[in-house]
Amino acid sequence: MKTVPERLTALRAAMAQAGCDAYIMPSSDPHSSEYAPQHYTAWEYFSGFSCENANLIVTAEEAALWVDGRFFGAADAALAGTGVASMHMGVKGVPTVSQWLSERMTSGKVLGYCAETMPVKQMRELAKLCQMQGAKLEDLPLVDKVWTENRPALPATPAWILDTAYAGKSASQKLEILRGKLSEQNCTAMLVTKLDSVAWLLNLRAADVESTPYALAFCYVDMEHAVVFMDTSRLSAEASQKLAEAGVETAEYMGMADYLAAGKKSQNVLVDPASLNASLNNALCENSAYTVTEGIDPIAMLKAVKNETELSCTRKAHLVDGAAMVRFQMELEARLAAGETLRETDIDTILHKYRSSNEKFITESFSTIAAWGSNAAMMHYAPKVGADAQLKCQGYLLVDSGATYYDGTTDITRTYRLGSLTEEEKLAYTRVLRCHIDIAMAVWHEGATGGELDMLARRPMWRHMLDYRCGTGHGVSHVGAVHEGPQSLRPHNNVVFVPGMVITDEPGIYEEGHMGIRIENELVCVEAGESEYGKFLRFEPLTYVPIDLSCVLTEELTREERAWINDYHAQVLEKLSPLLNEKEIQWLRTKCAAI
Amino acid sequence: MKTVPERLTALRAAMAQAGCDAYIMPSSDPHSSEYAPQHYTAWEYFSGFSCENANLIVTAEEAALWVDGRFFGAADAALAGTGVASMHMGVKGVPTVSQWLSERMTSGKVLGYCAETMPVKQMRELAKLCQMQGAKLEDLPLVDKVWTENRPALPATPAWILDTAYAGKSASQKLEILRGKLSEQNCTAMLVTKLDSVAWLLNLRAADVESTPYALAFCYVDMEHAVVFMDTSRLSAEASQKLAEAGVETAEYMGMADYLAAGKKSQNVLVDPASLNASLNNALCENSAYTVTEGIDPIAMLKAVKNETELSCTRKAHLVDGAAMVRFQMELEARLAAGETLRETDIDTILHKYRSSNEKFITESFSTIAAWGSNAAMMHYAPKVGADAQLKCQGYLLVDSGATYYDGTTDITRTYRLGSLTEEEKLAYTRVLRCHIDIAMAVWHEGATGGELDMLARRPMWRHMLDYRCGTGHGVSHVGAVHEGPQSLRPHNNVVFVPGMVITDEPGIYEEGHMGIRIENELVCVEAGESEYGKFLRFEPLTYVPIDLSCVLTEELTREERAWINDYHAQVLEKLSPLLNEKEIQWLRTKCAAI
């Protein structure tokens, strides 16, 4: 079964056999991860398109994949001719998953799903929808039945413990903090279900998901016990010992439901419905020893606010990464100037060479986006060997990349001028830069939310009725996933920024069929000072890499914006120079010249 | 009982007699009005300080008045020596009403209040607080007992009906719209309790509250009936006839509770707890014929989005008001130049002369704030004859004023340079102007909230760790109250702006003991256009009055800001000229010269 139509035919046969009229596959794993291990990527297997934040629904006649703004262009291209419709989420006139299902799930019809990979929240919405329609929602393991051939196994990468020298706090310290938070909410236990949260709580790392150094694991915590459920054979002796020292028991990944079923002591268990799967929810609800309290995973906020150790390590990681970016750009320029033929996929090769040469390098923090010309208009374009564009000496090259080091995780985008640019192209770049600077320069009275700050980034764009169909920025985990909540720069995000939160600042312009421009730094929220009006906060850059100013229409910038650029570049030069040789410093000096 | 201490002594005696340990008086009337009729202003009578959005609490030993940022300075001055503490709401270290009561309302203590003037929402919070403390909350009419001498009677101003030519829709049309909204919420009836809402629904006007052309009235609406409860002797024959034509029955103000008690038909009654008083809440809950649904008063949104007639009338009102402002400024300049002695209270006299000369003038929309020098640092300073400052030829004069005409209600602030200014004073003015322009120039993707837009106004101020302790702007009613919700420009306001909403744009700088600067226009939300990214909105000025540019440090402005000023002034000249004589036009031309 090599083609999408073949796979869909097989799924439809299994659906018919099971009396299932529609089958829904959210882009999830048992932990509601943003990036799921290959083993769980059924929506990709049956649609042929790789993405996150998606839902695939298959009926006897139809198949449709809902994707968000980052993937519109790429999904349209990839799904053409497969029999799977590309559904643009949030676009007027495009039905939502609920609307689409409401039209089809008429009385008596059966909607199938897999409880293990279904977030309980979504399951409840589907149950409500089915109830209102007189349809039935059934837990049917059809993916396991159909997707057997060549299915990737569950990941089994070596698991290890991030040293306190990098994490700032040991697992036993973090468990104490968590127990305090549980007590505040009158809870006595918690099911830690999100991989990020398990990783933070136990300082546990592995490489189960590409570019994300986490281990597939759950953790059960009560006032006396902490049990991690994972493939224990993957733990090194050292890791096992560290867990034992922190008072953490180990059990097998698949054993969690049974563990919950066997619980006898009365517990008030906190679960976060945003990352609890429907299967574990059933196990909890069926044991009368438990009172279930649904709430926000308290670890989300604990890990979002970085401690001093994490911050000082992260600053080091960004300088190492910045030096790699400088070397990359020098090599790129030199090879293009020498007339060498380079393709988009070569970018990652060069970047990897410089990043991985650092002894603390662990992995790229996501698949490098290197997009030339109109390819960059596809927000999450990933070039593939053999199908990638050759870099020509005109227009823009967008490079969005990053790495995880033992010191921290980076995420940076630069857009490079490869040759002649039109005035319009320069204007677009200048506008993106202004949006970027508006966030970077912001000072605000404490209490402002991500939604309110996001306004500053979009303002210069909106004035010209332009916009970008994504957030302005996202949190970044420490030695972890490149996307982290709860804070974000995005309309209506209501999380209040506090010192220690890390965020990306990455506005962009994406013109289909023409170009894509994005400029991204990571920033950390810090105190700006205090006045009679109260406490003020601001952002401080973590990323120090020159921004290509040869694409800027200087006269479009305000005096304050120019001052920010010059100050930033002076810092780039000062901070990166100790990591560079004379020739590199010389090169950097020209890139950081004041405008 | 002329002094505050005498009044407090009398109240404390009544409290002791009733076994009451603390008595709370919110700044409210039976409708939770922002500006209450004099009859209900107990918090002012017992504290000696006039303000809104306040709470006065009296115990045997203490008395404390909570005021918001607008009143900090004035309250401190007025309350000194009265035995009433001035409590600054929202300031760190100052206990909230709840915190203050929690410390004092220990087990067994009695907290008294008056149900008729207590918003049900606040009553519930107090009940919860008392329950947690083991204290008792009791409805005790102590104000009526103590405040008898010289107490203002209930207002009885003539009530009239605003013509459809100004209102755009008749009462019967509006009742149909409201019934439609009730049906959407599965409600069959509504208690319209907010004076603004009654006024809008029935096009009913009077002059019960100074500067606010409303009548003290409730309205009961179900699918067959609409009954207005008010002093019916105040209705002219014409007004009575118009109400009858619209199918509105009339009943006496005090009869509403009895009417509710007598209701036999089963009704699902919508009430808005934000404006329902505790007394009517009891009447509703005691009749089993009613199911009570609590929700947001749907009239709030209906009246906030102005119809075409309202908008075109409002535009006319603002030009008439703008011409009056021009004449006022000319007279002010001429008289000061002639060396005449002018005092702050003279400002209102001059303004009134020009505004009231228009045949459509009804009333000032609020007490004119004319504040010279450091007086302007008190946000809601109201000059009093005999205690007002003389205008000297230096520093700033802040004038915040407005009027209600049959065509609409205006609210405008200008800050005038009366003589020499320091660089610091000019810089402050320039910053306020930048904040103002940031809102005036904003273009945004539809869906942005008031909280998000507010960020744009504060941005230039926050950069220098400055702030103003109030919202950036508020809605304005049509021929009505000068403050109107639900939209506002204020941190965390989550109302989405839609075309037709009117808002003030009035950032300021207030330096205690030194100066106050505010620049205010009214704006209306309009469509900016549509692009591939969706629909965009912007604001359009309603106010056309020159802004004093002799206080501006031009070099601090961006090119875009300068362009906005020049464009605005060109429009001021164009729009006001038809209402002015040659000499006035000549004067205006110099004020509107491009920078």
Image: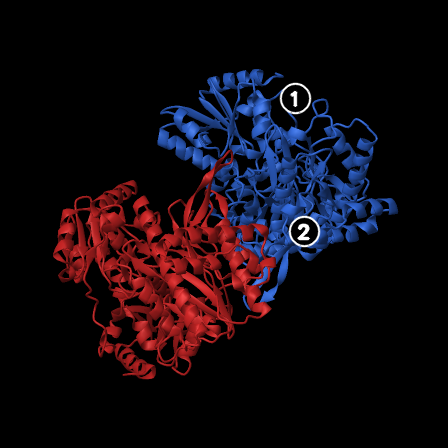
Chain colours: A blue, B red
Q: Residue under circle 2?
A: A562
Percent position (x, y) of residue B197? 28, 53
Q: In this view, does A288 lie to the left or right of A228?
A: left
Numbered mark located on residue B111 in the image: none
Amino acid type assigned to the residue bearing label 2 in the image: Arg
Q: How many labels does the image show?
A: 2
Question: Label 1's element?
Answer: loop
Q: What residue appears at the point 36 percent right and 29 percent down from the top-left corner?
A: A133
Q: Which chain carries label 1?
A: A
Q: Distance between the residues labelled 1 and 2?
A: 55 Å
Amino acid type assigned to the residue bearing label 1 in the image: Asn
Q: Residue under circle 1?
A: A150
Quarter of the rendering occupied by the N terminus of chain A: top right
Q: Is residue A203 left or right of residue A40?
A: right
**Which is more toward the observer, A175 or A545?**
A545
Q: What residue appears at the point 64 percent right and 36 percent down from the top-left corner?
A: A425
Percent position (x, y) of residue B453? 49, 51
Q: Is residue B102 visible?
A: no
Q: In this view, does A408 lie to the left or right of A305?
A: right
**Which is more toward the observer, B96 or B370?**
B370
